[in-house]
Amino acid sequence: MTGSILSTSGLVAGYEPDLPIVHGIDFSVASGELVVLLGPNGAGKSTFVKAIAGLVPIHAGTMLLNGRDITHVAPHRKVAEGLAFVPQTENVFATMTILENLQIAVAHLAKAKRAAAIEALFARFPDLAARPSRLAGALSGGQRQMLAVARALALDPPVIILDEPSAGLSPKIVSEVFEMLKAINASGVTVLLVEQNVKAALAIASRAVILAEGRIAHEGLPQDLASDPLVGKIYLGTAHDHQKAPA
Amino acid sequence: MTLDILAYAAFFLSMALTYAIICLGLNVQWGMTGLFNVGIAAFVAVGAYTSALLTTPPSPDRFGGFDLPIFVGWLGAAITSGLLSWAVGALTIRLRSDYLAIATFGIAVTVQLCMLNLQPITGGAFGIGFIPRPFAGLQENALLFSLANFGVMALVVLALYLGLEHLAKSPWGRVLRAIREDEMAAQALGKRPIRFRLQAFSLGGAIMGLAGAAQAHFIGFIAPDNYMPILTFQVWAMLIVGGSGNNRGAIAGAVLVWGLWALSAAAVSSFVPAEQQARAASLQIVAIGVGLCLMLLWRPRGLFGEVSPLTRLKSLRRAPSKE
Amino acid sequence: MNPQFIMDGLIAGAIIGLGAVGVTLTYSILRFSNFAHGELLSWGAYLALAVAGALGTLSAGLTKPIAPFSFGWALPLAAVIAIGLTGLLALAVDALLFSSFRRRGSAIIIMVMASFGASLALRSLLEFLFTSRPAYFTKALQIAMKLGGGLRATPDQLLMLGVTLVSVVTVHLLMTRTDIGRAMRAVSENPALASIAGIDVRRVIRTTWFLGAALACVAGIMSGLLIQIRPYIGHDLLLPLFAAAILGGIGSVPGAMLAGLIIGLCEALAVQAVGAEWRAAVSFVILIAVLLVRPRGLFGKAS
Ligand SMILES: Nc1ncnc2c1ncn2[C@@H]1O[C@H](COP(=O)(O)OP(=O)(O)OP(=O)(O)O)[C@@H](O)[C@H]1O
Ligand SMILES: [Mg+2]
């Protein structure tokens, strides 16, 4: 494993100027890792990753991508620097077709390379290839999630952050999503994954971080976390319940 | 000489106070409720024409002239403008916030057309004259007449001020504030935001109608030219300068802006050669427009304002980009 | 009834439609109704007038009418320059005014209000610079040609219809087939998602202003050529523009154009049926009807 590709130090962020949600997080992901970010609802996981992507104002602290300071870089510049982000909700352009969603994603490529890039994505996500002129808003939850991930992968990012990609999907699709994430990671992409689906996430993760009340509460290897009764009870209890509760 | 000055001061202040009434009405709509009205001139005009029709002596060449007492005219003015506001609000308040702005802009255009073209009712471009003036019996004595009229205006403004302050503290006003601060929460408490907004918009419109009537009777004649879009702009400038959400600010802003307006108009007419006066007048309007923008940029709370709808409205809906 | 109202309505509708396309674009991407949009039409017309005048003094040949039209080469040349200048004007207003509100995350209604102040200042500045006396692009008179079916139109008018058609088709293709068009639609749907999809939102906003202003300039010049140039042309067209943008459905380019034509035709019909003095009320009636029956308009998305 090589050095850190994405890191934050003392990151304070929140939606309103005097209301920080994330309180000084020191965090780092090494190149090639698949880090899973866990924590109860409202812990600030989404806020943290949105802050990294540039969608939530940063009050203090810094963040580095590939050794470059990207703390106050505009979101679209971060994308150009190699950081892709799949938000938890509203992660596709619902009023546009599948093809248009992907066309937007490959717009950074030279014109000549775009068709091939889209072909490659369709090959990877055959579900999407079936009817590329469908409106993204008309897709099922799972198909939408596929499209969102495809859109992010089209950016050909060294690092991809996904916020609960399995939320609201049927168990079968969930396992497909996790398989896909594993494959993406295996292809050399560094993955930061926010999840409520603790068991499945820990199964593919190389490291796990638990966030609670806007702070890092625990960090460790997946197997240690899974077997640590205290951690499981305090921080992941809600998550387990959440998983068992009928949808 | 001093008496003349005193009479003029009373005249000037009375005029400013009629604007203060409009401004208080706008404050109910914008300051208290956050509803944007671009058709102020229309609501003022409807009030003025209603009262004029009700109180003027019968006239052979147009509808009405019902020769009713002045206070009936004022009441009628408030009711008609209130109803018009209610109709516009009922149609648009449930929609996007700027649809109301567009609809009120449309009302202003349409009322202007009606004033000009419904000649049998409105007297067309010449308007309506011989509107009875309060204390007409005192007209011999300019000073007494001016002071009496000023007294009436001051009383109306005071009564409205006290009433609106009371209203703001009443349960109704508190619900309105709650809705403005957190629409979702208010809704969850079973308050129907649309209904309260609509009530506030109608009340504001009624006050503007009343102001129109007061102004009409103070001047004695009305014509479509008095109700051009510039009136709307002036009143907005007054409220923004005074600080929206603040009734005292609304009154102070009205007097201040009216004073500046009258002064600069006087300066234009005495220092600028006649053939350039129209141009100078347009510069004066440029100044209002730029001033409005600068206030929004630099002093969104107004010169005297304590609370600003800017911060309150912030959470309602945000602009698209952060830069 | 004289069928000529169809031709009159189409031409007025073309002008309204072009303006409304600009309104609908700025509305859907900047998310507020810009009361200063009408002023872009007026400024466009006056800028073209000023540039054409300057070109005319440089070379008298440029003012010689190009048969069969009523104007010389100075006008089309000036139009191109004026389009650029009007675009710059819109960008300048955005940089000085609206961008600050966006940065602060101000409420929509504050931007609406600022646009209201800007419209007042821009319009009165025109009155100051050019006075309120009407001005004309050309003094030449044109004879209307018979088109059959009882319709007549001057060559200028036919040219306007052609220019409108070309402009709207171009904008439509731009929106549906190009990167910048897709980026504009993406920002209009979800600016945050657009930014993390790699779209430079500020660039999209600048493009939108420029495009809206360019169309406004064309509409302003057409309106000036059709009747006359006054500082109030934009202000008088503002209600029809808003009505058309809402009738067409906010964000829909073809919708705005079609709605513009509908409003133009209704106005022309009303002029024949009720009288020219009520023309301005037509858009209001249509606006109210749309808000009552179908607030999202013909092609708008349900919100
Ligand atoms: N757009 C927003 N504006 C203001 N506050 C917000 C916003 N989104 C979230 N919050 C607040 O930030 C806090 C953290 O929310 P966040 O979405 O980051 O939690 P999370 O860990 O992702 O939870 P979940 O597992 O439910 O997705 C919550 O208290 C929430 O109320
Ligand atoms: Mg979340």
Image (spheres, coloured by chain):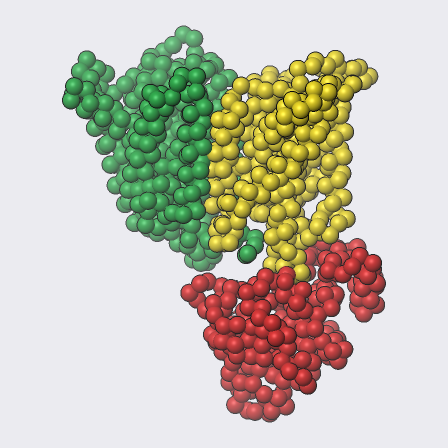
Report x, y in % for residue B130.
33, 13
Query: Going by the image, does B104 lie left or right of B309?
Result: right
Q: Residue lying farthest top?
A: B60
Q: Residue at x 29, y 34 (%)?
A: B255
Report x, y in % for residue C55.
66, 26
Which chain wears red?
Answer: A
Q: Residue at x 72, y 41 (%)?
A: C171
Query: Going by the image, does C13 lie left or right of B4?
Result: right
* Of residues C37 and B184, the one drawn nearer to the viewer in this rendering: C37
Query: Going by the image, does B145 lie left or right of B315?
Result: left
Q: Is residue A129 visible?
A: no
Where on the picture, by quarter, is residue A147? bottom right
Which chain wears green?
Answer: B
Report x, y in % for residue C120.
48, 33
Q: Residue at x 42, y 65 (%)?
A: A18
Q: Image height check: is C231 above or below C3?
A: below
Which chain wears yellow?
Answer: C
Q: Image height check: is A115 above or below C99?
A: below
Report x, y in % for residue B39.
46, 32
